[in-house]
Image: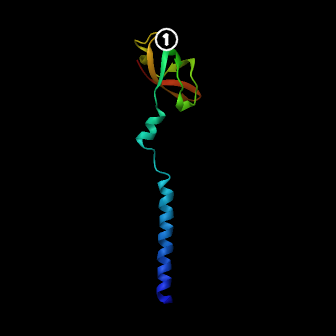
Amino acid sequence: MMKFLKPTLSVLVLCGGLSCGMTGMAQTAPQTPQTRSSAAAFTEAEVKKVDLSTGKVTLRHGEIKSLDMPPMTMVFTVKDKSLLQGVVAGDQVRFVVVSENGKLVITELVK
């Protein structure tokens, strides 16, 4: 009986160790496209002022969930000035803003 018990226990211990290792690996899986896209959610806003020469736009925006920011009116810099082409005060827009080195930058803006 002892002859069979020792190999059986060895197999059980080995299998248990492998399953624990696999559980840890599952927790470090890379982000899915759905996870990444939720970070880039659009926020609705009304354009108050556009300064094409400096690449800045003043927006009265709703809550920016990705930054935990309440609704307010503020000035943003755009990553690319071409985003402001055809945008004028009074337009309703949707935008994506990110924090780059402590500065809020609009990366997407659509009417």
The picture quadrant where one finds residue 101 is top right
Q: Secondary structure at mark 1?
A: strand
The picture quadrant where one finds residue 88 is top left
Q: Position of residue 4 (x, y in %)?
A: 46, 86
Residue 80 in view in this figure: no
Q: Position of residue 85 (x, y in %)?
A: 41, 13
Mark 1 belongs to which amino acid? Val
Q: Position of residue 105 (x, y in %)?
A: 52, 24
Label 1 Cα crowd, 10 Å radius (few <14 / some 14-19 / many 20+): many
Instruction: Read off the residue under disc 1.
Output: 50
Identified at 50% across, 62% down, the residue is: 21
Q: Is residue 38 above or below residue 88?
A: below
Q: Nearer the viewer, residue 108 or 5?
A: 5
Identified at 54% across, 26% down, the residue is: 63
Q: Is residue 37 above or below residue 110?
A: below
- The quadrant in which the C terminus is found is top left
Identified at 53% across, 19% down, the residue is: 76
Q: Is residue 86 above or below residue 20?
A: above
